[in-house]
Amino acid sequence: MNRYWVIFLFCAMAMTSRAQYNSNLVFGIKAGAARSLISELSPIFVSEDYYSGYSFEEKESISPTALLFVNYRIDPSPIALEGQLSYFQQATDLVYSDIKEFTYTTKFRYHYLGVGGYIKTSVIKGFNVGVGLRLGINLSPENLTYTSNASEIDWGDNSEIPSDSETQGELRSVIKGLNSTDFGIIGSYELGMGLSIDISYYQGLNDMVETLVNRHEFTNPKNKVSTFQLTVGYAITMDKNKKDSRRR
């Protein structure tokens, strides 16, 4: 629930404040890192209590991100519109362990080309907030990896355990990453000299992973993603009458 209070407070501040701009039109680049978590991955593999003595852990993953942006202020209002073209990942590590000391890790690493649109204003001079949507096209829907210690476990003489590469191939054939639609809230602080720091939060609105019909009884739960993102930006003004190149 804490994340929704943050969103509410940011929106409330945006609605009750005025922005200060030195230029109507700027463009630039941002780059940084994102920490994401895709939920409900473990029910894909074990959806019911078929047995006990095992556990799953879903671990957040940190990945790089970069984007190009254009920001336009609607003069003379305090409102600005920002469009973004971005690269980002949605990633999570799923770790399994049980009382037989068998462990495996499935790493989900989905790469996206994103397009975003945001409406922004200022809380105080130099500090801006915005809300909007980001649509992402999944460039690598089969990009998961599987590693385990299966080769180190004594399974008995009659057990035939597939290799990690065989298991990974099976998983890739039935578990597919989907395109994303995310609600985003952005807080940005201008440092001067065209530099800025942005902190963003994205909440996925759609299912992120699809499980196809398969012989392993893998299920198809709803998998939402949440992402925190930190970037450093550099902007150039398009207004020739303004020498200040700070981003708005």
Image: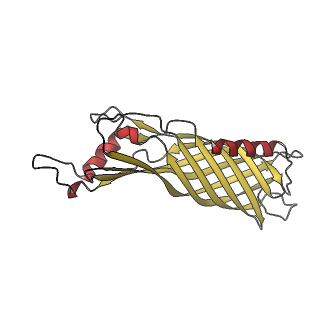
x 65%, y 55%: residue: 68
Q: Which residue is at 75% across, 49% downward? A: 129
Residue 167: x percent and y percent?
27, 47
Vertical arrangement, residue 108 with respect to residue 215, above or below? below
Residue drawn at the location 57% of the way across and 37% of the way down: 205
Which residue lies most toward the right here? Answer: 76
Camera-nearest residue between 162 and 1: 1
Left or right placement of residue 194 versus residue 55 in this view: right
Hey, which residue is sitting farthest top in the picture? 213
- Residue 238 falls in image quadrant: bottom right
Q: Which colour scheme is used?
A: secondary structure
- Quarter containing the N terminus: top right
Where residue 110 appears, x then y in whole percent? Answer: 46, 49
Q: Is residue 212 above or below residue 118?
A: above
Residue sitting at the far bottom: 193
Q: Where is residue 108 in the image (x, y as percent from the top left)?
A: 42, 49
